[in-house]
Image (cartoon, helix red, strand yellow):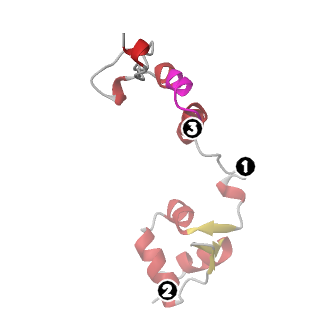
Amino acid sequence: MKEEMGIVVIKPIVSDVEMTSGPDDLPVDSLMSIGRFFPGFKSLMERVVVALERRSEPEPTSSVPLADKFLLTLAEAQVLTGLSREMLKRAVVAGELPSRLMGKAYRVKRDDLKYYVDNLWLD
């Protein structure tokens, strides 16, 4: 009758997605089907899924074994020497252990580290 009178009838969009208590309960496939009603949502969700999968992948490890490295980070020097990272950092800041700041991390030559450790008890 409304159509005969010229009144615009707006029908709600019904999807095959079951409504649940919250968006956390929706499986990814159901979220992807929402993309039919919201352009761009599907590609956004696909990018989110790819980003989450990448994030769960392990970080690539160094191809060079620690025993063959010439330059060491403070964490690697800590592993080799058994000294605390704080002690090594204090030695770097005091100038007792020569190092270079490369990017955000200090690098220490293996020979300088050996010399520092050999001379710890000479003082």
**Secondary-structure class at tag 2:** helix
Q: Position of residue 111 (x, y in %)?
A: 67, 75
Crowd tier of the residue under label 3, counting other residues whose Cα lies within 10 Å: few below 14, some 14–19, many 20 or above: few
The type of residue carrying mark 3 is Leu
Q: Earlier in the sequence, mark 2 or mark 1?
A: 1
Indicate which label's residue lies in the foreground, 1 or 3. Answer: 3
Find residue 55 and report its image quarter.
top right
The image's mark for residue 75 is none
Going by the image, does 41 lie left or right of 71?
Answer: left
Q: Position of residue 80 (x, y in %)?
A: 55, 61
Find residue 25 and report its image quarter.
top left
- Magenta span covers which residues? 32-40
**Secondary-structure class at tag 3:** helix
Q: Nearer the viewer, residue 49 or 115?
A: 49
Q: Nearer the viewer, residue 114 or 98?
A: 98
Image: 90 above or below 56: below
Find residue 107 and report its image quarter.
bottom right
**Residue at 61 percent of width and 84 percent of height:** 98
Residue behind mark 3: 44
**Residue at 66 percent of width and 71 percent of height:** 110
* Structural distance between the alpha carbons of marks 2 and 1: 30 Å
Indicate which label's residue lies in the foreground, 2 or 3. Answer: 3
Q: Position of residue 48 (x, y in %)?
A: 54, 38
Residue behind mark 1: 63
**Residue at 53 percent of width and 38 percent of height:** 52
Image: 104 above or below 10: below
Q: Earlier in the sequence, mark 1 or mark 3?
A: 3
The type of residue carrying mark 1 is Ser
Q: Position of residue 51 (x, y in %)?
A: 57, 40
Residue behind mark 2: 93
Q: Earlier in the sequence, mark 2 or mark 3?
A: 3
